[in-house]
Amino acid sequence: MAPDQKVLIQIARMKMPFGRYAGRPLIDLPEPYVVWFRNKGFPKGRLGMLLATLYEIKANGLELLLAPLREPSDPRYQNRDPRSFKEGD
């Protein structure tokens, strides 16, 4: 089953609403912080679902595929089809 593009866009653009990394885009949360949530329990609701999805993305090294979904003003934004990425890009 293909991931919902709206979920991926939210992960790339939504800011963490609380805590140490409040205001940081979810995709930019440090992996140990996301792993901590996985071990302690994700928040309820949409944010928990987004963080659980983010955990899978980070655990599989797929963050680069979200670069085209970042805000265009983000320096890590890449106007490029993620299917065109090759190993080592």
Image (cartoon, rainbow, N blue to C red):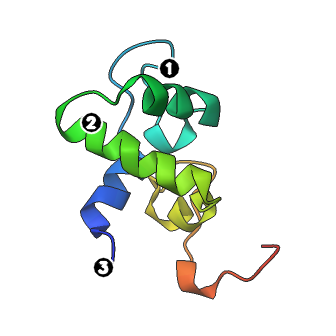
Q: Secondary structure at mark 3?
A: loop
**Residue in view at x 63 percent, y 49 percent:** 75
- Viewer-closest of 71 and 84: 84
**Residue in view at x 56 percent, y 67 percent:** 65
x then y, percent, for residue 4: 27, 68
Q: Contact, CB < 8 Å: mark 1 with mark 2?
A: no
Q: Secondary structure at mark 2?
A: helix
Check the image and name the residue furthest to the bottom.
84
Residue pointed to by mark 3: 1
Asked which quadrant contains residue 85, the reply is bottom right
Q: Give the left or right position of residue 61, taking residue 33 as reference.
A: right
Q: Amino acid at mark 2?
A: Leu
Q: How many marks?
A: 3
Q: Amino acid at mark 3?
A: Met
**Residue in view at x 39 percent, y 51 percent:** 53
Q: Amino acid at mark 1?
A: Tyr
